[in-house]
Image: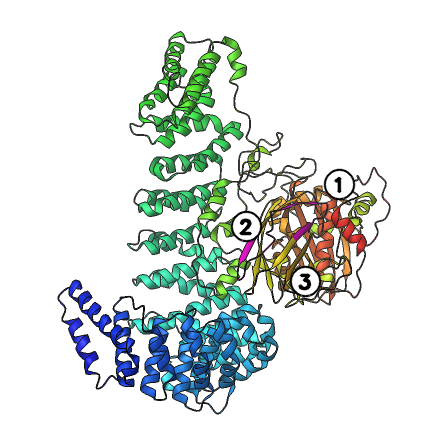
């Protein structure tokens, strides 16, 4: 950017640099702006040299931070100048001063297009650079074909083609329609054969954007990307100018791995072997050195390689190597490397079976909690929160409690919340949970929300054995000279309800308890006084026969607050005083609080709401949305002690069931089970025989449905025959004859099947709208959010959405707006409640109008059977008694399944785990068999344990025998059929389930399934189909 001969510009810059203060600079700038404005008014007298000089001055003033609100037309007009110096000034200044929506840019579109299609490479580069920086929708529509020709032209120099690729990337981001998906797959594959690494790097940036929106169209690019990655990893044919500190083109390596992560997991064994060799070379060749630039480049490659390893679902050995490498990084001095190590170790928690390996570095992670850098402390806290389970919960929570006293105030609220959630999830017993929460309140009372102490009250109220212990602990805290007000609240409630259980202990008489509480009254706010008044009334009620002195003291307090200005306090004082004069009747009026009803933990919901994702739109982020990406959900997959199933003891003994972390875990406990929290009933402790499962199975039997009544009812419900994978038909279900003028993008059935295995993704897409889903499942409840996105610049009108639920699902959709504005997205929450087990699928009837186009589709919703499963590990001591107690139909069904898709045993285990079935290794002595367990949740069955055994034949992988047992006959049949449908290859016609042999009523009880109403929408839909 030579400015030789521009003496006026040089003098102006010198004057600015010589200004003594900001005021002098502002005066000099105002003077110069006035001069430039005056000269521009007389534009006819300006020479090209003068116009160029004044435009440069405007740019310099703009770079100093001053507003330049004139002269834009002069800058744009220089673009059409015939000579390079003026044209260069026009392009540069226009790129800096104007944005993509500025009206003046429309005047330059033709000039820019002429420069792009011209023969002058310098002008082409200037035009491409400006469009790549500020090009908008109008530029995309006008220039995209010409830019594509430049990119694909073999006669253009690499310099021009590089800029053309980046320019096309900008235009594609502004308007994806400029790239025709059908025609560009082969062109992108052709560009990946380019030998020039500059063009290849720019083309790879374009490919990242293309596959992020639609990877299915670019499968031909996948082997090319693998070859590029292999070439770079082996440093083959890499020019010296693209070798950065000894690393062959690190940017291209990162982008190649990023592209590969947008494709589904690669199954081809040769390709996987090549990729693992490349990744192994990357992992082994990375180490921390003193050169910061080399560290940055090598770590960029390394951390993308780690994400790629997770995407490929590598073997455990490579995962262990990745974790060991990250363990080295979190122990170095450099804070940036420690931060990246902790962040990527947190991402590794998404991978199955890696959590145990990460636990080996627990001591070093805890040390990072005391790091001077707060960002490192936050990452260490997230990692500890995510890696916590039943085995290490005590150690981690105790470390968090110790750190709480010295933690920054900015972290204490998050730290307290996560410590409370971990204590609730993984408490070995409830007394430990109470200790932890009381310590949290004592150490960080200002940062403890009401939800935390509300939760303690729920647990104490719902567990009779815990009440004396909790009352004694809160009394100990009240004996301290300084007590936080939150501690006073929880203590007042617990002592008011249960202090009478301590009456025989020293220092715990009603008068002494009242004295301890009353000492805190002058120090609390008006929100706590009502709780104290309630506690006084309860203490007075429990004092039988009445203590006259204590009664007079409490009555005096009630009299004092009868005239309080606070209405709540006044009402309580008046009413308690009147009630306390009723004598013995007070026992009935102020009886002990009843058990709290079942409810979801508000702590977990609060933690989820507080998480904010600021990561870039990358493959890692998309995969994190599709899987359980945050630490809260990862730990939720593990069983929490203290939960008991609400099934009859005659059917199922007490077994650990994954807790949904709510009061239902404690209120639904059968009264006949008096075990403490976290303990297990020992049933038949004798060691199993060599093949106990085979002994228990007995003769081979192929069982049908549990009863004719159940099947007749379920046949009335809408079912797309063959299950999730049995029909390759579209997810669009035609209900009536109609002309649908809009064609969908992509395979809708595949989108539905993918959403059955993950919780977020795209359900449907066409040229005008995209319907996405993000779901969260807890026990028998589900919350789906439908994201309706308008992809165009015109509104979508007459939008309608109707849910057609099957009889076993209770669904409620929020209001859907009639119009979706241009380029806007609306969210429509959908609440789901599972009533009983069934494989029937809900349907979304969606329609809209765009211009003259009318679209109406019927889409299956992924609220399927496996969404209400929760995997649970079961030991041999727990499994075999349950298996033995569930003997024969209809609670245990067995079937030989033929026509199975041949797959190796590890792949079958992964398939089962994707349906939320936990593989239990070591239970079956035959290595060709699989044993799995899971818990099914519905409103009728609550938490129901399911046990599965799959026997395979190594000589014939196309057949297997499946045995499934549970405490509910309908669940047993439905889950067996569900698993069978996933194992069998897709048939050409829907297969009806085998009929069951007649069974006498005494031998086979008919389950009480709810009757399906005659006007059920899903039944009507099934009839039409």
**Which residue position holds label 1?**
1009
Q: Where residue 368 sits: x, y (%)? A: 34, 54
Disc with the residue nearer the chain's start (1 vs 2):
2
Q: Is residue 731 above or below residue 450?
A: below
- Badge number at residue 637: 2
> Distance from label 1 to label 2 (Cα)?
29 Å
Disc 3 and disc 1 in contact, CB within 8 angstroms:
no
The residue that disc 3 covers is: 854
Residue depicted at 51% across the width and 18% down the height = 590
| Residue 672, image quadrant | top right
In this image, 499 relative to 916: left or right?
Answer: left
**Compared with residue 480, is residue 509 higher up or lower down, i.e. above or below?**
above
Query: In this rendering, does residue 236 appear at all?
Result: no
Crowd band around label 2 with a 10 angstrom C-alpha radius: few (<14), some (14–19), many (20+): some
Expressed as whole percent of the image width and height from the top left, the position of residue 1007 reads: 76, 40
Instruction: Tell me where residue 570 sits by quadrant.
Output: top left
Q: Nearer the viewer, residue 134 or 326?
A: 134
Percent position of residue 210, x then y: 53, 72
**Circle nearer the viewer, 1 or 2:** 1
């Amino acid at each position: 950017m030579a400015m030789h001969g521009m003496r006026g510009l040089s003098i102006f810059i010198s004057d600015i640099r010589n200004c003594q203060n900001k005021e002098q600079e502002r005066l000099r700038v105002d003077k110069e702006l006035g001069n430039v404005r005056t000269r521009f008014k007389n534009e006819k007298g300006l020479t090209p040299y003068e116009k160029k000089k004044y435009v440069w001055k405007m740019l310099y003033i703009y770079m100093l931070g001053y507003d330049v609100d004139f002269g834009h037309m002069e800058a744009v007009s220089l673009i059409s100048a015939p000579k390079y110096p003026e044209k260069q000034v026009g392009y540069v200044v226009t790129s800096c001063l104007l944005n993509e929506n500025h009206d003046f840019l429309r005047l330059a579109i033709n000039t820019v297009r002429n420069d792009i299609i011209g023969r002058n490479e310098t002008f082409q580069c200037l035009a491409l650079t400006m469009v790549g920086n500020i090009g908008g929708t109008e530029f995309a529509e006008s220039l995209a074909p010409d830019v594509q020709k430049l990119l694909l032209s073999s006669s253009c120099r690499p310099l021009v083609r590089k800029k053309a690729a980046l320019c096309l990337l900008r235009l594609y981001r502004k308007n994806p329609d400029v790239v025709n998906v059908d025609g560009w797959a082969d062109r992108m594959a052709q560009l990946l054969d380019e030998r020039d690494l500059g063009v290849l790097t720019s083309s790879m940036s374009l490919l990242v954007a293309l596959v992020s929106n639609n990877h299915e169209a670019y499968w031909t690019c996948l082997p090319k990307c693998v070859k590029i990655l292999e070439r770079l990893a082996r440093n083959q044919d890499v020019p010296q100018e693209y070798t950065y500190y000894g690393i062959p083109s690190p940017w291209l390596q990162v982008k190649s791995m990023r592209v590969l992560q947008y494709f589904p997991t690669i199954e081809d064994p040769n390709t996987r072997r090549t990729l693992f060799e490349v990744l192994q070379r990357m992992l082994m060749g990375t180490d921390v050195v003193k050169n910061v630039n080399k560290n940055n480049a090598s770590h960029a490659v390394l951390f993308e390689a780690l994400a790629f390893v997770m995407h490929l679902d590598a073997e455990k050995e490579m995962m262990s190597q990745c974790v060991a490498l990250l363990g080295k990084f979190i122990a170095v001095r450099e804070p940036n490397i420690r931060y990246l190590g902790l962040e990527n170790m947190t991402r590794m928690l998404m991978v199955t079976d890696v959590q145990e390996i990460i636990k080996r570095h627990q001591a070093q992670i805890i040390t990072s909690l005391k790091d001077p850098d707060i960002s490192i402390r936050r990452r260490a806290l997230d990692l500890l929160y995510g890696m916590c389970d039943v085995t290490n919960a005590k150690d981690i929570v105790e470390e968090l409690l110790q750190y709480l006293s010295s933690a920054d105030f900015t972290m204490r609220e998050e730290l307290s919340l996560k410590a409370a959630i971990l204590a609730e999830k993984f408490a070995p017993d409830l007394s430990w949970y109470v200790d932890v929460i009381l310590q949290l309140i004592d150490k960080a009372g200002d940062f403890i929300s009401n939800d935390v102490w509300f939760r303690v009250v729920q647990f104490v109220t719902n567990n009779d054995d815990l009440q004396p212990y909790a009352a004694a602990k809160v009394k100990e805290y009240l004996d301290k000279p300084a007590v936080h007000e939150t501690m006073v609240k929880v203590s007042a409630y617990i002592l008011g309800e249960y202090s009478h259980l301590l009456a025989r202990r020293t220092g715990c008489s009603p008068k002494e308890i009242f004295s301890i509480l009353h000492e805190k009254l002058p120090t609390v706010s008006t929100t706590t006084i009502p709780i104290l008044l309630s506690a006084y009334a309860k203490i007075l009620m429990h004092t039988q026969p009445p203590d006259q002195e204590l009664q007079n003291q409490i009555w005096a307090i009630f009299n004092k607050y009868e005239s309080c200005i606070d209405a709540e306090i006044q009402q309580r004082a008046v009413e308690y005083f009147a009630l306390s004069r009723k004598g013995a009747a007070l026992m009935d009026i102020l009886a002990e609080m009843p058990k709290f009803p079942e409810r979801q933990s508000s702590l977990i919901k609060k933690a989820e709401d507080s998480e904010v994702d600021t990561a870039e739109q990358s493959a890692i982020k998309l995969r994190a949305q599709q899987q359980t990406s945050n630490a809260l959900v990862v730990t939720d997959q593990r069983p929490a002690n203290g939960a008991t199933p609400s099934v009859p003891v005659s059917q199922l003994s007490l077994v650990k069931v994954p807790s949904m972390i709510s009061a239902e875990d404690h209120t639904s406990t059968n009264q006949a089970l008096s075990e403490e929290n976290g303990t297990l009933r020992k049933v038949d402790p004798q060691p199993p025989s060599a093949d106990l499962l085979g002994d228990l199975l007995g003769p081979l039997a192929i069982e049908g449905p549990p009863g004719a009544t159940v099947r007749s009812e379920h046949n009335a419900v809408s079912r797309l025959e063959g299950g999730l994978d049995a029909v390759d038909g579209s997810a669009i279900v035609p209900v009536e004859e109609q002309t649908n003028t809009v064609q969908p993008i992509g395979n809708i059935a595949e989108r539905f099947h993918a959403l059955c295995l993950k919780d977020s993704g795209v359900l449907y897409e066409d040229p005008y709208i995209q319907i996405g889903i993000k779901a969260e499942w807890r026990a028998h409840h589900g919350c789906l959010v439908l994201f309706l996105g308008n992809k165009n610049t015109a509104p979508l009108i007459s939008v309608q959405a109707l849910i057609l639920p099957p009889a076993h699902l209770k669904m409620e959709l929020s209001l859907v707006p009639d119009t979706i504005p241009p380029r806007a997205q609306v969210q429509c929450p959908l609440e789901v409640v599972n009533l009983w087990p069934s494989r029937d699928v809900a349907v979304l009837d969606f329609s809209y109008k765009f211009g003259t186009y009318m679209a109406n589709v019927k889409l299956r919703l992924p609220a399927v059977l496996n969404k209400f499963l929760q995997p649970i590990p079961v030991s041999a001591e727990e499994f075999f008694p349950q298996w033995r107690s569930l003997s024969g139909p209809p609670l245990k069904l067995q079937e030989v399944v033929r026509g199975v898709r041949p797959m190796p045993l590890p792949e079958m285990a992964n398939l089962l785990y994707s349906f939320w079935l936990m593989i239990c290794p070591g239970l079956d002595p035959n290595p060709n068999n699989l044993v799995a367990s899971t818990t099914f949740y519905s409103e009728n069955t609550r938490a129901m344990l399911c046990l599965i055994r799959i026997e395979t034949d190594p000589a014939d992988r196309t057949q297997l025998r499946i045995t499934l047992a549970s405490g509910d006959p309908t669940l047993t049949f439905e889950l067996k059929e569900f698993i069978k449908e996933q194992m069998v290859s897709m048939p050409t016609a829907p297969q009806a389930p085998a009929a069951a042999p007649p069974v006498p009523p005494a031998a086979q009880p008919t389950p009480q399934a709810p009757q399906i109403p005659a006007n059920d929408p899903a039944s009507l839909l099934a009839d039409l189909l």
